[in-house]
Image (spheres, grey):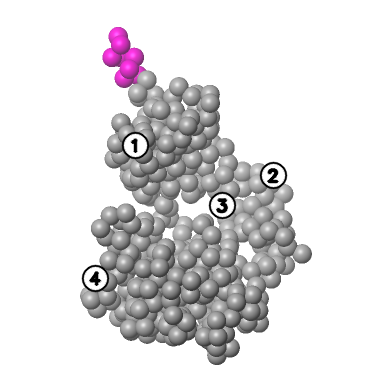
Amino acid sequence: MGTKNSNSSENGVVHLVDDLLNRAIRGRGSDVHFEPGEREMRVRYRIDGLLHDLDRIPGQLAENVIARLKVLAGLLTYRIDIPQEGAFNSRQIEGANGEPLDLRVATFPTVRGERAVVRLLHTVGQISGLEELGLDQSLVTEFERAARQPQGLILVTGPAGSGKSTTLYAIARYILSEDPGRSVVSLEDPVEQRIAGMTQIQIAPHGELNYPRAMRSLLRQDVQVLLVGEIRDAETAHVVVEASLTGHLIMSTMHSGDPAETIVRLLEMGIAPYQLVSALNVVCAQRLVRTVCPACKGRGECEPCAGTGYAGRTACGQLAAMDETLRQAILDHRPVGELRKIVNRQRPDLTTDGKRLVDAGRTTLDELRRVLGDVE
């Protein structure tokens, strides 16, 4: 009887976790948070950048729920004192329908038990072209111009969840469509979209195959265009800049507020000003804002937007292209404030570009304030 009850309880947890993940997948969630509390586990999922409640689980089941996620992701169930990361496919979930997708699991110990976040890497319905991003046409034109160059550095910056990788993928697709004869390779952690015609490599940042080591090896394999998922440290920054100066077109991302901050951060990483002005083609800072639900016109009265008044997201941005004025300011070691004034004379800042979307009725001033802070 004890074994039967144990199996029944185990099956119940399996069905519970599978149901939660299926609901998040159907709702087009990007992440699912399993957050332990004193008496219950709160489960939330992220839609269009905001977390929404999905369910609440009795506290006595929390440990088993995390254990089920660990089994799916191939993690050690008996280690509850260390962070762990793993992955699995939606085909392992009972009742999953539609296109298979990859799921990434990260666990972390807390004082109330282990916390887990599952990232859903959707492949269907992803933005594919530069024109679909929502950026102003002048920025799209600059990206296309930079992508046609035989060498140099294209940077996309912004906080986590601002669509940086999506923009890089769109640039890569543009290159592949305009010049299919070029050798295009990516180094990513993780691979978020599968791109036909591009060799994609998943690196292990805490293992032997990290960004700098993988880049140095790949550059000896006749690569012309290299997409590097993120510049995380000074070593990666130096390899990226060196590669862009030796006949390669490099695309990458950084966590930075605006183009001026990005330039200063690279200089602080030890990149020589004369190298940076020769390497950098363009740097674009971007943010994602939710778009007004077309079904209820933003009133928040329909199922497609889950009563939020918003459905989907679009991008606003500010792009800086290397010109003589900016080049000289960098060589003269001008402070970030002066660099920002120069960039603002080139292109409207993020707030101004965001207002373009408000004026077009695609988003609201409240949403712009949520993403960018104070907006006049």
Camera-side residue: 142 or 309? 142
Residue 4: give x, y in percent of width and height. Answer: 30, 14
Q: Earlier in the sequence, mark 3 or mark 2?
A: 3
Of labels 3 and 4, the one closer to you: 4
The residue lying at 64 percent from left, 79 percent from top is 338
Q: Earlier in the sequence, mark 2 or mark 1?
A: 1
- The quadrant of the picture occupied by the C terminus is bottom right
Spatial separation of the CA atoms under disc 1 and disc 4: 33 Å
Q: Which residue is mark 2?
A: 301
> Which mark identifies residue 48?
3
Image: magenta residue range: 1-8
Name the residue at the bottom extreme.
324
Question: Amino acid under label 2?
Answer: Glu
Q: Characterize the local packing of mark 1: few (<14), some (14-19) or many (20 or more) Cα atoms within 10 angstroms.
A: many
Q: Earlier in the sequence, mark 2 or mark 4?
A: 4
Secondary structure, mark 3, is: loop
Q: Which residue is mark 1?
A: 70
> Which mark identifies residue 217?
4
The residue lying at 58 percent from left, 48 percent from top is 50
Question: Amino acid under label 4?
Answer: Ser
The image shows residue 78, relative to residue 368, as above or below, that is above
